[in-house]
Amino acid sequence: MSLDLSVQHRFDGFALDAGFTAPEGVTVLFGRSGSGKTTIVNVVAGLLRPDRARVSVCGEVLCDSASGRWVPAARRRIGYVFQDARLFPHLSVRQNLTYGQRFSPAPLGTAQSARIVEMLGLGALLTRRPGALSGGEKQRVAIGRALLSGPRLLLMDEPLASLDEARKAEILPYLERLRDEAQMPLLYVSHSTAEVTRLATTLVLLHEGRVARAGPVADVLSDPELAPMLGVRRAGAFLTGRVARHHEDGLTELTSPAGAIFLPRVAAAPGATLRVRIAAQDVLLAAAHPSEISALNVLSVEVLAVRQGDGPGVMVQLDAGGERLLARITRRSAEALGIAPGRRCYAIVKTLSVAPFAIGENATADP
Ligand SMILES: Nc1ncnc2c1ncn2[C@@H]1O[C@H](COP(=O)(O)OP(=O)(O)OP(=O)(O)O)[C@@H](O)[C@H]1O
């Protein structure tokens, strides 16, 4: 079950030339404004007929300019969730949910529909009108409506962008469940590194209409060569860890291949596996194990690569027990500490620098 895509298209002043494979799970299209994310989504949906393209979903060719094949949007069996929920205000949640089924070539049956209503927590909302729903609830209905039409692929174009932080936090666990249970590719456009960390299985980094890099999210986020495209302040990798215990002083302790990690308390139960995003600029490096220091997270690491920036900073890629971290330090410090590939040192991560929104459940990792 995958989406395979290659597309070339020109607008006045913009050329798109991109190709990638999106396997099951969430493939996030990430890149600056105007890098071509929505154009790609529109080609996959069948809303834009490009100059040249080949798009196939689960082996079925939907568009092939070489042979002239073009399956119209309505027959593609693709679900589309937009930034705004676009529900019908005069219909109940139940009627909104079933609306898409009327036009679908393969709508879900009653049992599967009930399963999706349960997965998205919509049971208690079925008789309400959209006007009586929060933004997060509306988006859950929009996702449910897309799923009930029986899609082979779900397209989500910044589905959280119109929500505040509280509503985002409310809907993310549902998206995680969808990722882990839907057994289809989800193509997801986002500007948010927190969403990428939390949801992505695969990351496609777009830069000026081209794929700068595509691959497993941990590999792409920890590549120091890509940091300039992400922006040095936004660059950072993540560690996966398992909740070991909640301490009485408000900290949660994770065990990870990199060592123990302490976080402000998270809601996840002991045993849950989490991804913890660690921004490169929040990591300090020390040649020796520091003593009498306030930071709780001190990880033994090995330098894998060093990337020199244009300014005074360098981006250092680190191996932490088999996982990858990035640290952004000054060139001056790197020279003083002898930071070079193969050098063993210590990465210090200030406990409270790990933002709660950046912590997500990750059913696929098993440290
Ligand atoms: N219908 C159109 N006609 C002309 N130019 C277009 C059209 N649609 C998009 N473009 C241009 O193509 C480029 C890519 O647009 P696209 O919407 O795919 O970018 P994006 O990465 O989704 O951006 P954003 O993050 O701001 O939504 C932009 O320069 C945009 O102005």
Image (spheres, helix red, strand yellow):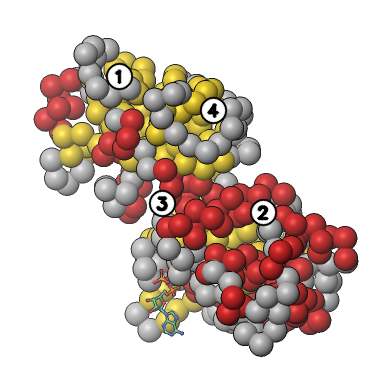
The amino acid beneath tag 3 is Thr
**Residue displayed at 41% across by 73% down:** 15
Element type at mark 1: strand
Question: In the current view of this chain or complex, which residue is farthest to the bottom?
Answer: 90
**Residue displayed at 23% across by 12% down:** 291
- Mark 1 or mark 3: name the one nearer the start of the chain: 3
Q: Where residue 60 appears, x then y in whole percent?
A: 76, 66
**Residue displayed at 54% across by 55% down:** 170
**Mark drawn on residue 178:** 2
Which residue is under mark 3?
Answer: 193
- Asked if marks 2 and 1 touch (Cβ < 8 Å), the reply is no
Q: CA distance from mark 3 to mark 4?
A: 22 Å
Question: Is 16 above or below relative to 27?
Answer: below
Mark 2 residue crowding within 10 angstroms, few (<14) / some (14–19) / many (20+): many
Position of residue 230 in the picture relative to residue 16 (left or right): left
The amino acid beneath tag 2 is Leu
Q: Nearer the viewer, residue 178 or 14?
A: 178
Q: CA distance from mark 2 to mark 3?
A: 19 Å
Q: Nearer the viewer, residue 200 or 8?
A: 200
Q: CA distance from mark 1 to mark 3?
A: 25 Å
Q: CA distance from mark 2 to mark 1?
A: 37 Å
Element type at mark 2: helix
